[in-house]
Amino acid sequence: MTDIQLYNTATRSKAPFEPQDAENVRMYVCGPTVYDRAHIGNARPVIVFDTLYRLLRHVYGADHVTYVRNFTDIDDKINARAARDGRSIREITGETTAWYLEDMAAVGALEPNQMPRATDWIGEMIEMAEGLIERGHAYAAEGHVLFRVRSYQDYGALSGRSVDDMIAGARVEVAPFKEDPMDFVIWKPSDADTPGWDSPWGRGRPGWHIECSAMAFGLLGDSFDIHGGGNDLTFPHHENEIAQSRCMGHGFAKVWMHNEMLQVEGKKMSKSLGNFFTIRDLLDQGVPGEVIRFVFLSTHYRKPMDWTAEKAREAETTLRKWAKAVGGVAPGVVDPAFLAALADDLNTAGAIARLHALYGAGDAPALRAALDLLGFTLDGFGEETVGDDVAGLIETLLKDRAEARASKDFARADALRDGFAAAGVLIKDTASGAEWELSPEFDLTKLEALK
């Protein structure tokens, strides 16, 4: 069996992955708060953990992997949008959840086995809050339930922070009903205009952190193999999940995995900088979902990723080239070197380098199998055809270039070379003659100007 190595944030080291039960490998990933379209940064953990999900299915069998990713459908941002638009919470979250699934499918993500909505698990959250109070790890105050952070001696271990340092660095006003500044909310009261549920502490709604603890326990059991998410969730969200769950006596997650953040053209994505856009924006601009996936996987998940238009153009050129090579080809055996790269803490950059090598070697069946495992169907990439007029013009110009070279008319030969590049015609000279293909930036007007 393939030896999978994973980096564990909790131990700060990479180690062989050993599932607690190879017949039921279990993974939980924090999902979106569904109040609007998913921006491109939201897609990074989806693509990263979809790739891990595919690898686990390949190694252990599709029927032996359980992947859970939640939807947070109760949140102040959702409440604010409902009030703004005059629509119900359920209507908004139903719409935005459908958008999310549609956009993530477009970037090649499989749907998880379970996708629980937080509002369907309120009873379990209340039950967990009651259990924490009974054990002395939480307390009720003014309609709230708060977790006693100092009651869990390992608090801060995941993120490498100490409670005292966190308090010293805090610059927020502490609610008067808190016993300790670091105590966090498990349950909070709702007014008449805010969604709420009846509880032992009055009408209210859950805090964010209790959601995942309750849903992970309910769907994956006392202990499971992998918990994933963006590194912005390490503290406080994941730290708080661990504290709540461990204080309920649950083993919770064994391996913690976090992906780094995303930039756009070398800068942090921000609406104020004008570089903020959604997955749907890119799709509507004609960027194929698999191009988005390729760009994301070209950088290791634990490194910051920079989305650039140039990377997208290069990705599309590569995928079109590979699509032609594997068109109509049945997948062969997954290449061992490709699989080894992927199993080495999801070294997707190394796996893609191996795809280039397989293409160069002309091993179309192995290339097809590796592309399938990495989540690339390439449907539609090989369908683009070049009209006879365009093909004829390119062949004529290539003949002109050959004649110019033969007659030592280097000015004409160089002009054609540069003109092809400007027109988006990619030329490769081989022993058997010149080969060509059109890049996504193909410009017929510039090509015709070379006549």
Image: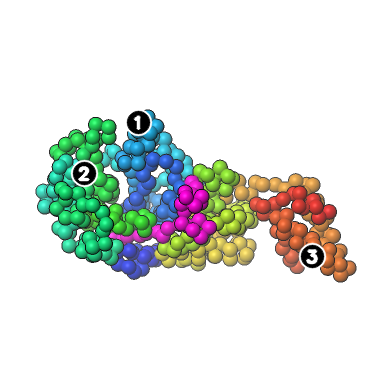
The reply to whether residue 396 is visible in this rendering is: yes
**Residue that mark 3 sits on:** 414
Q: Which one is in front, 240 or 25?
A: 240
Q: How many marks?
A: 3
At 37% across and 46% down in the image, what residue appears? 32
Name the spot of residue 15 as percent of width and height, x first: 34, 68
* Residue 229 location (% of width, % of height): 36, 55
Image quadrant of residue 366? bottom right
Whether the magenta-drawn stretch holds residue 360 is answered as no
Residue 128 in the image: state x and y as whole percent: 19, 46
Q: Which residue is mark 2?
A: 187
Disc number placed over residue 88 in the picture, else none: 1
> Is 385 left or right of 319, judged from the image as shown?
right
Q: Is residue 275 magenta?
A: yes
Q: Which mark is residue 402?
A: none
Query: Which comes before the other along the chain, label 2 or label 1?
Result: 1
Separation (CA) of disc 2 from disc 1: 22 Å
Reading the chain from its start, which is encountered first: label 2 or label 3?
A: 2
**Secondary structure at numbered mark 1:** loop
Using the image, determine if residue 71 lies above or below residue 1: above
Give the residue type at disc 1.
Ser
**Residues drawn in magenta:** 254-278
